[in-house]
Amino acid sequence: MPAVVFDVNETLLDLSALDPLFERHFGDVAVRREWFALVLHCAMAITATGGYEDFSTITVASLRALASQRHVDLHEAGVQEIVAGMRRLPAHPEVPRALARLRDGGLRLAALTNSPLPMADEQLVNAGVRHALEAVVSCSEVRRLKPAAEPYQMAAERLAIPIDEMVLVAAHGWDVAGAMAAGSRAIFVARPGQSLLPVGRHPEFVAADITGVADRLLGART
């Protein structure tokens, strides 16, 4: 039976919940997107050059670097407030019902995230969706961040399926590209502000949200 493996941040969980914190500490909600883009840029650069760094370390270092670039006096209390906000992100509104539909439809569900496992578990529990997932797999277990091949391969191994029976669902074009390069199927979720890579292979389907993913996968089985 195919397994559906979800990215977590931005795909299942809504990072815009951090906007009030960025407005408070940086004076501009747009900085939240700039910060997370820097986080992902650093993660991919480290991965592309064969290295590894804990994703939480990258998020905090990127936050401090951005504060320095913008000449913002971000105290440790502010850093910790934003980190705590990451742990309490809400699920996107359609996610709980869509995950329940997929699970009730007989599909196996899991998550694959760059975040360390304790943080990812806490995020998903706080968002009220951890119970819908058979497993949560962290890239820290293989010390390689997405979009390297090893995390996707590990997720398939953890679920005891061939990787071509895994469907990676993500709101990041680079994540979709990494999954397909590793041999997985993929669906892109076109959250606002997200887009597929302008070059390379495209996934089998593009959905507006997780409801669209459920419609596609469950419809394909009828």
Image: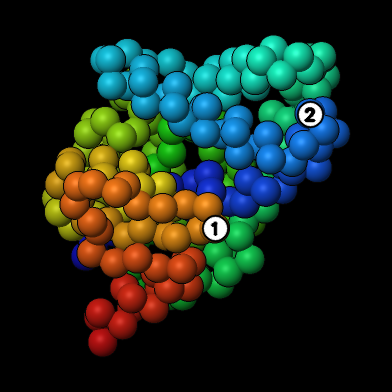
Which residue lies under the disc numbered 1?
192
Residue 39, above or below 214: above
Q: Is residue 110 visible?
A: no
Picture quadrant where residue 93 is located: bottom right
Label 1 or label 2, whichever comes before in sequence order: 2
Tell me what residue is drawn at x 31 percent, y 73 percent. 217
Q: How crowded is mark 1: few (under 14 residues within 10 Å), some or many (20 or more)?
A: few
Q: Tell me the SS state at disc 2.
A: helix
* Residue 182 horizontal/vertical position (percent): 18, 41
Cα–Cα gap, marks 1 and 2: 22 Å
Counting from the top left corner in percent of width and height, residue 78 is at: 80, 23
Image quadrant holding the N terminus, namely: bottom left
Q: In this view, does 58 lie to the left or right of 166?
A: right
How many numbered tags mark residues here? 2
At label 1, which amino acid type do we have? Pro
Which quadrant holds the C terminus?
bottom left
Residue kind at label 2, given as amino acid type: Phe
User: Residue 80 placed where, x, y %?
Assistant: 75, 23
Left or right of 7, for residue 18: right
- Residue placed most toward the observer, 83 or 128: 83
- Does 90 appear above or below 158? below
Quarter where residue 70 is shown: top right
SS for dot 1 = loop
Residue 166 in sight here: yes
Identify the residue at image location x=43%, y=39%: 113
The image quarter containing residue 142 is top left
In the image, what residue occupies the spot 82% across and 14% down?
73
**Residue highlighted by disc 2:** 26
